Image (cartoon, helix red, strand yellow):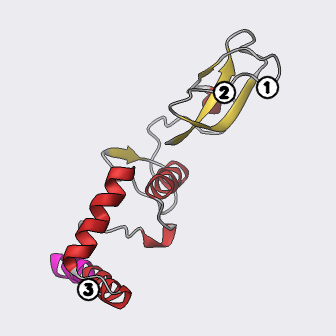
């Protein structure tokens, strides 16, 4: 699995840092490209360099309201969009396939959308020539490979 973090050099932490470095989690952070030393994850970089503003309890401005996704509450659109993009990347799905549902939607509307998605999956499998037993075997094989 790949992850993205801000990294800073252990030998020159104030001068050598990189924002949003993508690397394989099992391999760990890559070496510093400038001096070759080890690097560590540094979570304060964005706040130090003005990429994210601190929340000082100011009232909501604009149309974005705090949203909870995956157990984490996001207070600005940028961090929420990053979370959605990461979710899509990790699950290998297109951003357009993510449906954001509010608690105000009726359960009937949510259930209808879920049933439509299930039916579309059944139709796709039938077109491909899978019956239910074959499809379940295929899914088990795919899970074993990952």
**Disc 1, SS:** loop
Q: Which residue is mark 2?
A: 30
Which badge, 3 or 1, is on the more N-terminal residue?
A: 1
- Residue 25: say if magenta: no
The main secondary structure of the magenta stretch is: helix
**Disc 2, SS:** loop
Image quadrant in which you'd find residue 141: bottom left
Q: Which residue is mark 3?
A: 119
From the viewer's side, name the closer residue of 45 and 130.
130
Q: Which residue is mark 1?
A: 33
Other residues around mark 1 within 10 Å, as few (<14) / some (14–19) / many (≥20): few
Residue 50 seen in this snapshot: no
Instruction: Please provide the residue range marked out in magenta.
Output: 104-115
Residue drawn at (26%, 85%) of the image: 119
Image coords of residue 24 (percent x, y): 56, 37
Residue drawn at (16%, 75%) of the image: 107
Q: Are marks 3 and 1 in contact (CB under 8 Å)?
A: no
Residue drawn at (72%, 25%) of the image: 17
Which badge, 3 or 2, is on the more N-terminal residue?
A: 2
Residue 57 seen in this snapshot: yes
Other residues around mark 2 within 10 Å, as few (<14) / some (14–19) / many (≥20): some
Would you place residue 107 above or below residue 2 in this image?
below
From the viewer's side, name the closer residue of 37 and 41.
37
Q: Are marks 3 and 2 in contact (CB under 8 Å)?
A: no
Residue drawn at (32%, 83%) of the image: 125
Q: CA distance from mark 3 to mark 2?
A: 45 Å
Would you place residue 46 above or below residue 13 in this image?
below
Q: Are marks 2 and 1 in contact (CB under 8 Å)?
A: yes
Which residue is farthest right?
34
Q: CA distance from mark 3 to mark 1?
A: 50 Å
Image coords of residue 36 (percent x, y): 77, 17
**Disc 3, SS:** helix
């Amino acid at each position: 699995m790949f992850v993205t973090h801000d990294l800073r050099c252990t030998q020159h932490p104030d001068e050598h840092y990189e924002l949003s470095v993508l690397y394989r989690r099992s391999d760990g952070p890559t070496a510093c490209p400038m001096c070759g030393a080890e690097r560590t994850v540094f979570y304060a970089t964005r706040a130090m360099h003005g990429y994210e503003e601190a929340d000082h309890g100011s009232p909501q401005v604009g149309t974005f309201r705090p949203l909870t996704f995956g157990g984490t509450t996001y207070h600005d659109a940028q961090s929420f969009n990053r979370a959605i993009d990461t979710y899509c990347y990790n699950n290998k799905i297109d951003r357009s396939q993510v449906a954001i549902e509010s608690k105000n939607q009726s359960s009937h509307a949510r259930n209808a959308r879920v049933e439509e998605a299930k039916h579309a999956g059944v139709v796709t499998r039938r077109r491909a020539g899978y019956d239910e037993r074959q499809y379940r075997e295929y899914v088990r094989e795919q899970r074993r490979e990952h």
